[in-house]
Image (cartoon, rainbow, N blue to C red):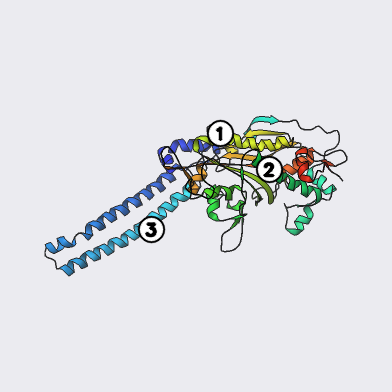
Amino acid sequence: MLDIKYLRSHLEDAATQLRKKYYELDIERFKALDNERKQAGVDSQNLLAERKKTSNKIGQLIKDGMAVDEAKKTVAESLEKIDEQHNVLKEQAREAQESIDEFMLEIPNIPDESVPEGKDESANREVLRWGEPRIFDYDVLDHVDLGLQKNEMDFDLASKLTGSRFVVMRGQIAAMHRALIQFMLDTHIEEHGYQEIYVPYMVNRDSLYGTGQLPKFEEDLFKLEGEQNYYLIPTAEVPVTNIARDLIVGNAGRGLDQLPLKFVCHTPCFRSEAGSYGRDTRGMIRQHQFEKVELVHMVQPDQSEQHLEELVGHAETILQKLELPYRKVVLCGGDLGFSACKTYDLEVWLPGQNAYREISSCSNFGDYQARRMKARYRDNESAKPAYLHTLNGSGLAIGRTLVAVMESYQNADRSITVPKVLQPYMRGIERIND
């Protein structure tokens, strides 16, 4: 969440900056809630001061001629009334604090100054293009037709087992899917210095509040029935980032000894895709369950811009090793995620769609998530705990990478050439045949 002290002293500026995200900050409501919270606190303190003063009156009452027992009874009755009033004020203060907390949780992160203006993805700014899309001299099939032709990709069977937007893979297509996961993990660990981590695929509400999925985006999540209030993870970002929740890095142990922390994690991801009905219903582009290799950085504030460039570069490495053409765009304000202050998207070329499609989103969240999680580090100079900065990105989405490989490496006989970097992970197979 945003720093409430910053909001109080820069309210108009914050409102102006948030309009870049097409979010209208309710200034008057913030002022009213904040004043209500302050007043409840002042009234409570005043009443405590009155209580202290009243409790000291026994001696004065006795001095004025009142009997000791009567003086004690009089003061006790007054204190009882004050305590009743104080309990009411404490409840009002608690409700006022809850209201301001709920209001703060609904405010998105302020976009970085470098984020371009714009309402939707059409205003995203391209900053790089790598590779040239392959030119085919025969009709191109998309991944669905290629997979069905080989009888190694079955959407009807998945629909019978579960429902729409799932897939069953088998044989060499399933092997390539698995190979992509291991290839990405090895690359990020061996070449980019990430620590591999394994996390639960279910999380509690606190974790989802910490990274910003709750309360605003609950309809996008799969909630499990039961008393535990568990949710299936929409991305490994949630459990991995929450490792630092309520901790001070450097004092926490658990492998969190010093910044920067760089984790790589492979998990399935589960998304309800609320609001996306009718979009990408064919194939593996937008599914309820998919695999992803996630990259998470936790860094000192003055290093987060540098780490964003580093992180997106690591994701680009995977595309380059696979020799898949892509473009890099910086998202405009209107397309920027709720918790992010700056995001790069990588969009891979899909011959079956004759278009670039998102395959990785790499974001800097500043201290926005850390404030929600109370995730801090100890500054060596001041020795005072401060909020760390968090970043994450896909390195990459496995299903969409598989789609890109299948479509880009297809041959006239409908076989699929296995990219050289994947062949060691597929027992040396060079081509997926009919």
Say which amino acid is labelled 3: Glu
Q: Locate residue 410, reporting x and y percent.
A: 82, 39
110, above or below 40, in the image: above
- In front of the other: label 3 or label 2? 2
Q: Earlier in the sequence, mark 2 or mark 1?
A: 2
> Does residue 189 appear in the picture of this structure?
yes
Q: Nearer the viewer, mark 3 or mark 1?
A: 1
160 relative to 80 in the view: left or right: right
Query: Disc 2 marks which residue?
Result: 186
Q: Is residue 107 visible?
A: no
**Dot 3 corresponds to which residue?**
91
Residue 340 sits in quarter: top right
Residue that carries the numbered disc 1 in the rendered image: 306
Please tell me which residue lies in front, 117 or 129: 129
Q: Earlier in the sequence, mark 3 or mark 2?
A: 3
Q: Amino acid at mark 2?
A: Asp
Quadrant of the rendered structure where residue 348 is? top right
Which dot marks residue 84?
Answer: none
